[in-house]
Image (tube, coloured by chain):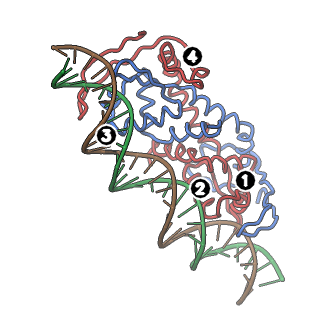
Chain colours: A blue, B red, C green, D brown
Amino acid sequence: MNERDKHDLVWKALADSTRRDLLDALAAGPLSTGDLVAKFDSLCRTNVMKHLDVLVQANLVVIRREGRMRWNYLNPVPIQRICDRWVSKHVKKMASALGHLKDHIEVSSTTAQQVDKSSAKPQTQRAKQKQTKARKRKPQNTP
Amino acid sequence: MNERDKHDLVWKALADSTRRDLLDALAAGPLSTGDLVAKFDSLCRTNVMKHLDVLVQANLVVIRREGRMRWNYLNPVPIQRICDRWVSKHVKKMASALGHLKDHIEVSSTTAQQVDKSSAKPQTQRAKQKQTKARKRKPQNTP
DNA sequence: TCAATATGTCACTATTTAGTGACATGAACG
DNA sequence: CGTTCATGTCACTAAATAGTGACATATTGA
């Protein structure tokens, strides 16, 4: 399993709100599987275990066995890791992307409060040709 | 659409590696849909548009129309927002969770490097009873 | 040993999502 | 006009995922 796949497992695991809730429950301290089942009334035990499996695969939950008990521990490291990586990966580009964004955008009500202002410089693109033929062209920066 | 649902849209949108790649491509600056189709050789145009729709729903991509062209802009705000919120939401618990974790864990090779050390204090849990009956019990902290 | 309990596994259905081709719309431009 | 091309929409199939009940395993303690 390469790094990118592991990365993807974490994203996939975090994509589900039920699993994020499970992580929430474990944030205060480890719980047994049965504890979690009791806590999440809408889910059957098998379902909880399946979600836990996904979290374990992503290394977001680590288990410790004690007799017939299984204690589930939250491992927060991959979360911070993925956030750090994703944000830092884009942090420079983000500043410019925010710049590109403003000026002329169909500003939605929510977007309006979330977007900064600066310049917009589209990339010049389009090399290969698939079924959709295309030619070089350059849009106005500030119509 | 409540805040939690919007939150979920962002997670769901980011869960797919193709969509993360699309965001990567837009990080350098806006691209038209056709540009993106040309860039992602393995995807058909309809597929690219569907992924873009998901990103637009999550407000991760904002579009600007210019004649018959559609320019897709990355909006990095929700990413930072979700990372900030998720991390800060757990930041205190995380320190303690990391504490809970070490001591006695079936340390996997990858986990070993990602986990800190301190104390482990399981929660006392288990209230309701579903099909799985359960009684109160408390595991050893450090076996 | 035997019964209760916690967890593990299997087989299956239902829902969602990915992915595609065909056709529709609408601006650009001769 | 009418053609070209970027984009939009629809209908459909295939694959992945959520979710469940039934049964299996294994530990605990009377």
Quadrant in the rendering for residue C20? bottom right
User: What's the amino acid at mark 1?
Assistant: Pro
Q: Are marks 3 and 1 in contact (CB under 8 Å)?
A: no
In the displayed structure image, the side of residue A80 where residue A103 appears, left or right: right
Q: Determine whether the residue tagged by mark 2 lies in a helix, strand or loop.
A: helix
Question: Where is residue D1 drawn, in percent x and y?
Answer: 71, 90
Q: Write down the residue under mark 1.
A: B30
Residue A35 seen from this side:
no
User: Mark 1 belongs to which subunit?
Assistant: B
Question: Where is residue B28 drawn, in percent x and y?
Answer: 75, 47
Residue drawn at (77%, 54%) of the image: A122
Disc 2 packing (10 Å; few <14; some 14–19; many ≥20): some
Residue drawn at (79%, 54%) of the image: A123
Above or below: residue A12 compared with residue C26: above
Q: Are marks 2 and 3 in contact (CB under 8 Å)?
A: no
Q: Write down the residue under mark 4.
A: B116
Q: Determine whether the residue tagged by mark 4 lies in a helix, strand or loop.
A: loop
Q: Write down the residue under mark 3.
A: A42
Q: Which numbered tag is attached to residue A65?
A: none
Q: Write down the residue under mark 2.
A: B51
User: Mark 2 belongs to which subunit?
Assistant: B
Mark 2 → mark 1, Cα distance in angstroms: 16 Å
Q: Are marks 1 and 4 in contact (CB under 8 Å)?
A: no
Number of numbered markers = 4
User: What's the amino acid at mark 2?
Assistant: His
